[in-house]
Image: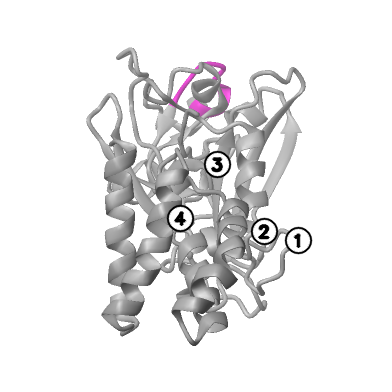
Amino acid sequence: MSSEEWREIWLQKMRQVLSAKKFKASTMEGFIDIVDRYLVSYTCHPGMIPQEKAFEFLAKNKKSEMQERFSRGSVIFSFIIAVFCNAQSGSKAETVSDIDGNIYKTIIIGNQIWTGENYKATRYRDGTPIPLVTESKKWSLLKTPAYCWYKNDTINKEKYGALYNWYAVNKGQLAPAGWHVPLKSDWDALVNFLVRNGYNWDGTTNQNKVGKALAATTEWWKSRNKGAVGNDLSKNNSTGFSALPSGFRVIFGHFDDNGNIGGYWWTDTRDNDSLIHSCALTNDKSFFDRQPIKKNPENMSYGLSVRILKDR
């Protein structure tokens, strides 16, 4: 999709938001005019406009244009910043398909484009099959790539995606061309963007409390812990990441932590000889966790979910 097409889609989306807020047509078109000229001046598509640039632009124009046009300048300025800067995160970008023909919705968060659901391909992008291993003992002894469905039930494919062992991720051929399994730096960039831009459950901008922003609004066990993923699910998923408690397969081959408790994702850390990394959300915690674990056959036998990220 071209930059011009993105611009038109974004402006249409903004008109819909402003119309829903019952702003007068003249006021609404004033908004659109200012933002339109900014979109034209910024070369990337509007889903990737950095918040800092938006603030910089709007701040320069606040007195010269905003307050001249609208008597409620300060209120309107705050509103347009909220629409302008937050509409980028969780907005739908494009779809991507894997080698098996599965189609994934994608979302824009900051300057990253993620799949909004877990990966489920059963072949590498060159068409090579990934072995499906259901037997627990065989899984625990593997030192080669494998995948499975949670509890070996294909009914979990569409909802939770596949669980892959580390060897399947390590091959570097899992994602479609132009996409990749996220590096640890990619996950860190995601969390840092969300923290910096007020996606913590309490609105703070100095600690990782973004679990609710990433977690889906369904399936998580309830929690009494304030700010936890499982506390008031209606406040989850402001990013559209839609993380579900998809569970994992442990080193002995059995399954754990589905039943609405946790979701776990691999990180591509092939450049590190001693550590591998996984990420997690759990129902009773408020943060998105990334943990390094020792690179040994036992840990590489874990079956975890995968998200993919578009190359930049």
Evaluate if marks 2 and 3 touch, with contact meaning CB atoms under 8 Å apart: no
Relative to 275, say whether 117 is above or below.
below
Task: Find the distance from the CA under tag 1 to the CA under tag 3.
Answer: 21 Å
Residue 14 position in % (x across, y down): 34, 65
| Residue underneath mark 2 | 195
| Residue underneath mark 3 | 265
In what element is the residue under mark 2?
helix
Amino acid type at image mark 3: Trp
| Residue underneath mark 1 | 207
Of labels 1 and 2, earlier in sequence is 2
Q: Quadrant of residue 3?
A: top left
Locate the N terminus and report the quarter of the image it occupies.
Answer: top left
Relative to 146, say whether 103 is above or below.
below
Q: Residue at x 28, y 24 (%)?
A: 99
Relative to 35, say whether 107 is above or below.
above
Which mark, by number, is residue 88?
A: 4
Q: Nearer the viewer, residue 229 or 31?
A: 31
Tell me the magenta residue range: 139-146
Amino acid type at image mark 2: Val
Between circles 2 and 3, the one closer to the viewer is 2
In what element is the residue under mark 1?
loop
In what element is the residue under mark 3?
strand
Between circles 2 and 4, the one closer to the viewer is 4
Residue 291 position in % (x across, y down): 72, 42
In what element is the residue under mark 4?
loop
Q: Nearer the viewer, residue 174 or 200?
A: 200
